[in-house]
Amino acid sequence: MVKKYGFGKEIETDAVSEKIEESSKSELEIEATTDAEGTHFTMELTDETAVYGLGEQMRGINKRGWIYTSRNMDDPSLTESRESLYGSHNFILITTKERNSGIFIDATGRVTYDIGYTKYDELRITVSGGFDLYTIEERTALEVVREFRRIIGKSYVPPKWALGYGQSRWGYKTEADVREIVSGFEKNKLPLSMIYLDIDYMDRYKDFTIDKNRFPDFEGLVRELKAKGIRLIPIIDAAIKIEEGYEVYDEGVKNNRFCKDKEGKEFVVGVWPGDSVLPDVLNKETREWFGEKYKILLDKGIEGFWNDMNEPSLFYSKQNFVKCINEIAEKKGKDLQAEDFNHINYLLSQLANNEEDFKSFYHNADGKTISHDKVHNVYGYLLTRAAAEYFEKYNPNKKYLLFSRSSSIGMHRYGGIWMGDNASWWVHMLSEFKMLPSLNMCGFLYVGADVGGFDGNTTEDLLLRWFALNIFIPLMRNHSVPQSRRQEPYMFGKTEVFRNFLNIRYKLIPYIYEELERCAESNEMLFKPLAFEYPDDERAKETEDQLIFGKEVMLSPVFEQNASGRYVYLPEKMKLIKMKSCEEFTVTELEQGDHYIKVPLDTFAFFVKENGYSKIMDYIQK
Ligand code: MIG
């Protein structure tokens, strides 16, 4: 059962698409108090309580024992000490033997979840600003999720081709670069469905432009690649370059489309294009205007996009940058000491994504003037929604690929997400895996992390294990930074193994897509923790490096370097399928309990439940 309680929300987020009447606060079972910090909800955690949810966050699937914050943030050090990442997903699920309860906080500002961090046996949620609170009580964890997903509306489903393999790298700059990738895949007989274009395709980082020198015949290239089954997927950043004569900027200024400072002038920020302004997507008309800009690329045959820097991520605000430079200039010619050095370092470190900046620019949220810090967490969602709503107008009969870095609940209806700037670390494979069920709970089904790791140098064994891990993950994109070692699948010795893994993926696409559509339609999770599927099994409850995919598959990837196998826990009798290729595989039946399985580097291993075996085999042997 769902109940809604009003706490004076700042704006309508449309996160919940179902109309729900407000209940009286006297019915609320959670202790609520209010002080200068905001509204607090406090609950006791017994030893057996587990807390799930929160979407894109580090650490475990069970979120107990840490403090998490909803504050969309671009910071590429994805470590255990982080409290927030790029998205804010304010849904948690609390399970005990007796009860399964969900809480959704429909807020646009900061929310903190202290889940046994300050006090081991206490959950304390603090919400700054206004919000709506939803509570959901159901018999099982899976039913709580289904009910929550029902009220937030149907999840985005991409076109089927978006389940193919995508090759990306920040550093493909020209038509020649793109052709080199295509021929690398062709020569090595590797399937390829998408090539991603990062910021260098644009004319000096101006959204919706193309650098004519680098891509003299963009439309021709798009057409030619599409004939081979390969789509070009350009990036769109949030900020718009200040440049007279640049249509998007000129129109935006003329029609008041950008965020303003307190005097009502455009608030100037710095991102890739240099001095820029931010589209005020809290405003419906601005969303319509910004969405329509995608037409420029849609008309050139583009069918998919990735939206970046939309937390929004700011290198600096003009006002702060100027202040900082002046302060540093004052030191000129003076006797400099360690404290000066530290102070300058500090000043520079405070430029990016500064909370004071977030307080000093404003939105026109459909008539209500509101400072950015109060609505920060929905900016990326609304920017992505602007695009999706335009695609619907542009061609209502077609599905487009769209995913975003920043997000909040509500955006799950409009696009997917990628998990941001991970690194070529083994532990980041595990992070991707653990975020899957948490994101699914919050409605995001089309998700995935940068395969091979974005930052740092990958190794062939890491990349192979990562390919194997992603065989069942809807978004399978290899992406990396310019200064890292190249990581296309033909850059190493074991090209044949990469080819086999990709061929297995392509065989499974119809199955994965069917499951994805089914889960979107019926509000289910594509990736489930064992705890949800086997709630009475104590071992299953604590198993976080295995997941149930759809109705019949169990995944148990290898997450460690130099391991030629791993332990798995089987909550019931299952068949182990070990595949070297679609033609060469073995099937072994294993009993409920613990097993050590050998998984050499050239092998993809997964489990199927008794009832799923023939179905899966049909797909593989088709
Ligand atoms: O400041 O466009 O997460 O995928 O390659 C970095 C360049 C901006 C961050 C994205 C990453 C992308 C990169 N972008």
Image (spheres, rainbow, N blue to C red):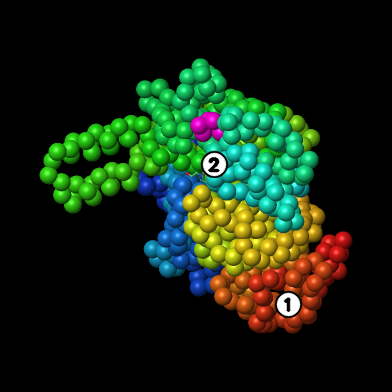
Q: CA distance from mark 1 to mark 2?
A: 42 Å
Q: Amino acid at mark 2?
A: Asp
Badge 2 residue CB within 8 Å of ligand 1? yes
Read off the magenta span.
202-208
Q: Which residue is mark 1?
A: 572
| Mark sitting earlier along the chain (1/2) | 2
Asked if 484 appears above or below 16 in the picture, the reply is below
Asked if 456 appears above or below 296 in the picture, the reply is below
Q: Nearer the viewer, residue 319 or 540?
A: 319
User: For residue 308, which numbered disc appears in the image?
Assistant: 2
Q: In the drawing, does residue 205 fall left or right of residue 168?
A: left
Number of the front mark, 1 or 2 = 2
The spot of residue 504 in percent (x, y) is 76, 62
Q: Amino acid at mark 1?
A: Glu
User: For residue 476, which numbered disc appears in the image?
Assistant: none
Magenta segment main secondary structure: loop
